[in-house]
Amino acid sequence: MRLILIKSLFIFTASFILVGCQTLKNILPGDSESTKNECSQWKDADSKEDDCVDWDAAKFGSMAKKALDNNNYDKAIKIYEAMEARYPFGPDSAQTQLNIAYAYYKNSDHDAAISTADHFIKTNPRSPYVDYAYYLKGLVNYKRDIGFIDRYLPTDGSQRDPNSATEAYNIFSELLRRFPTSKYAADVKHRMLGLKNKLAMHEVHVARYYMKRKAYVAAANRAVGVVEKYQRTPAIPYALQIMQEAYTKLDMTDLAKDAQKLYEANFANTPPEDIENRPPAQKVWDFIGLEQ
C-alpha cells in the first residue's frame, strides 16, 4: 500500500512539473508564438530570411545592421526593438539603445531619436559612448529644419525659427564641455561655427524687420546684441550699419558716429551686400518672400 502511494505521488509530481515547464515556456520571452508575432512586424511576405524564431542576439544585430545598410530604417528600428525586448540585460543592450536612436535619426523621427538618446544618457552615465549620444542629439537638431526644399532651392536658414539651431548649439557646447577630447570634437566645432553664423544673421534679419516697421529702438538693441554676442561672424558689419541707421533715426548722433567709426575701422574695404548679383533662383525665392 505504501509503495502504491509513493508511486502515485511521484506520477502526480512529475505531471505537475511537466505542466509547469509548459506554462513557463508559454510565458517566457522567446516562445514560438511570441517570436512569430515579433517576426511579423518586419517579415517580408516571401522571405524566409526574416524568420526570427531561432535568432540569437548576434543574428538580431546582423539583420538590423543589414536593414540599416539598405536604408530600411523602419525595419531596422523594429528589429533592434525586438532585440532589446528579447535581451534586455545582454552585454550589447546599451549599444542597442544607441543603434535604435541612430535608426530613428536616419528615419527622420527626430523626437524619438532625442528621447532614446536622452534615455541612454540617463541609464548609462558612465558609458564610453555617452559623448556619441550627445553628438546624435545635436545632429538631430542641427538637421531638424533641413527638408526637401532646402536641398534643391537656395533658401536662407537664418531667416527661419532659430530654436532648433539654438538647441543644437547648446547641446554641442555641452558635449565639448564634458568631453573636450571626444573624437567628435573637431566636427562639433565646425558645426558650431556655422550655427553661430546662422544665429547671428537671424538677429540681423530681425533687426532689419524692426527697421522696416520703424521700431528703431528695438532694431538698435538687436544689432547691439549681435556685436556683443557674435563677434567674428559675417553678421557684424550688417549689425553696425543697422546701429548707425537706427541711432540716426533716433537723433542719437554720438552713438551713430561710434557705429560708423567701428564700421569704417574694420569693414571699410568690405563690399556691401550685393543684391543684384544674387543667383536667379535666389532672387525668385526672395521675391516670393516665403522666409520673411
Image (cartoon, rainbow, N blue to C red):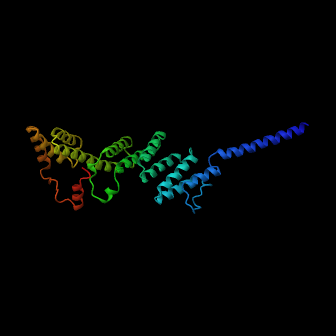
Closer to us: 229 or 162: 162
Q: Residue at x 8, y 39 (%)?
A: 253
Position above or below: 68 against 177: below
Q: Is residue 87 left or right of residue 273?
A: right
Residue 63 position by quadrant:
bottom right
Quarter in which the N terminus is drawn: top right
Residue 163 position by quadrant:
top left
Q: Residue at x 53, y 46 (%)?
A: 93
Closer to us: 12 or 60: 12
**Residue farthest to the bottom?**
46
**Image coordinates for residue 229, horizontal then vertical, percent:** 24, 41
Q: Is residue 108 left or right of residue 165?
A: right
**Residue farthest to the front?**
288
Q: Is residue 10 left or right of residue 22?
A: right
**Image coordinates for residue 284, horizontal then vertical, percent:** 23, 59
Closer to us: 253 or 130: 253
Q: Residue at x 44, y 43 (%)?
A: 115
**Residue farthest to the top?**
2
Q: Is residue 80 left or right of residue 271?
A: right
Q: Is residue 205 visible?
A: yes
**Image coordinates for residue 3, horizontal then vertical, percent:** 89, 39
**Image coordinates for residue 80, horizontal then vertical, percent:** 52, 51
Q: Is residue 91 visible?
A: no
Q: How many marks?
A: 0
